[in-house]
Amino acid sequence: MVAQSSCVRLEPAVSGSSFVPARRAWLVLEDGATFGGVRIGAEGDAGGEVVFTTSMTGYQEVMSDPSYRGQIVVMAYPLIGNYGFTPAHWEAGGPHVAGLIVREASAVASHYLSHEPLDHFLHTHAVVGLAQVDTRALVRHLRVHGLKRGVIAETPGQPAQAQAAALPAISDQDLVAQVSRTSIEVLAGSGPRIVVIDCGVKNGIISALLRRECEVVLMPFTATADDVRTVAPDGVLVSNGPGDPAVLTNVIGTVRALLHHYPVMGVCLGHQLLALACGGRTHKMKFGHRGSNQPVIESGSNRVMITTQNHGFAVDPDVPEALEITHRNLNDGTVEGLRHTTQPAFSVQFHPEGRPGPGDADPLYDQFLGTIRQVSGA
């Protein structure tokens, strides 16, 4: 009997005494580029903007990060699924990715906390996946030609390419509305009361505040400045989330109105929304920053942090006078942090809490709470 491989393969695999045929499928991009592989997870087609992350671990956090809504995620690291899945690592109530592309999909989950292997997880949560793809060639294509819309389809060719080209652009979708909560939720704590404007907040951000004994008030992205004032917070955090920040005109107006009343911290999408609220501009990046190994340098101190990031839009470096740049990406010089020059507000493009990734920037939450104490005189 041929030994079963721990990775999904293109050729038929042996299972017991019978052959299990490989389920062939293709990723077809809107420009016609085609990458073959083997199906994992749910049946059917899937479509979305095809992006890649360089994270070596944390695939469960990636798949459950609301910021990936509407996107097919390519894992650049070649082996995915080897330590399985556990409820402790959810960043939301379930997966948000439109699909998953990997090189090798481990059939064995080797970790004592694992509850299920990759393929079972994808089936359970109806996520369409593709394994045995030449992800190195795919990532190179996206880096050279920019991010593309794509579909995971049963057959390659012009119909699949047309299907990909017909998908709505990220900027034409109301993605935040799909991931934000619809009602207020209060998480008790003995410390400062922090309103989190939920544009697709990760559990890691909430946990970072709760570890610091904050009372966390989670509010929908539709909350107005008056709604926020009603709960009398000590500070406001504008969360991460998916899509184009420029389409969130109501949230931009809310942030603008709150700046003169409360300390404000923006994370990821919240960073972009703070810039727009102050008169700045944003633009879509060629292929974005996604991964847990992004180097960021802090102005003045020249301190370098390795950070976790997930964004496809960036703040234009020509910022208005009300803002100053505090952090830049060491790879491409893009704006990674801002501080308001007259109000107690700042923002970062990266995720201080990691999840997954290093904790180099975690003290920024302490900085936020320090600003709150300074403003309140406590």
Image (cartoon, helix red, strand yellow):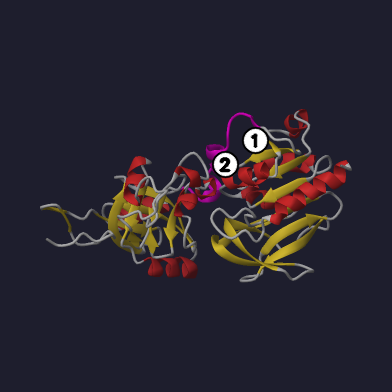
Q: Nearer the viewer, residue 19 or 52?
A: 19
Q: Residue at x 54, y 43 (%)?
A: 175
Quadrant where the image shows the N terminus: bottom left
Looking at the image, which is closer to me, 233 or 33?
233
Q: Residue furthest right?
A: 377
Residue linked to disc 1: 218
The answer to which of 294 and 362 lies nearer the viewer is 362
> Is 304 placed left or right of 55 in the picture?
right
Query: In the image, which disc is placed on residue 363?
Result: none
Question: In the picture shown, does residue 319 fall above or below 113?
Answer: below
Using the rendered view, name the quadrant where residue 313 is placed. bottom right
Q: Amino acid at mark 1?
A: Leu
Q: Which residues are magenta?
A: 168-187
Q: Which of pointers 1 and 2 indicates the residue nearer the eye?
A: 1
Does 135 appear above or below 101? Answer: below
Given the image, on which type of amino acid does mark 2 rest? Val
Q: Position of residue 375 (x, y in %)?
A: 86, 44
The magenta stretch spans residue 170:
yes
| Mark 1, other Cα within 10 Å: few <14 / some 14–19 / many ≥20 | many
114 and 262: which is toward the camera: 114
Task: State the quadrant of the C terminus.
Answer: top right
Residue 256: horizontal and vertical position, in percent? Answer: 77, 43
Q: Image quadrant of residue 75?
A: bottom left
Q: Which residue: 76% across, 67% down?
A: 299
Residue that badge 2 annotates = 176
What percent of the width, then of the height, locates residue 305? 66, 65
Mark 1 and mark 2: Cα distance apart in space:
15 Å
Residue 254 colored in magenta in the image: no
At mark 1, the secondary structure is strand
First of labels 1, 2 by sequence position: 2
User: Please, is residue 174 above or below residue 186 in the view?
Assistant: below
* Secondary element type, mark 2: helix
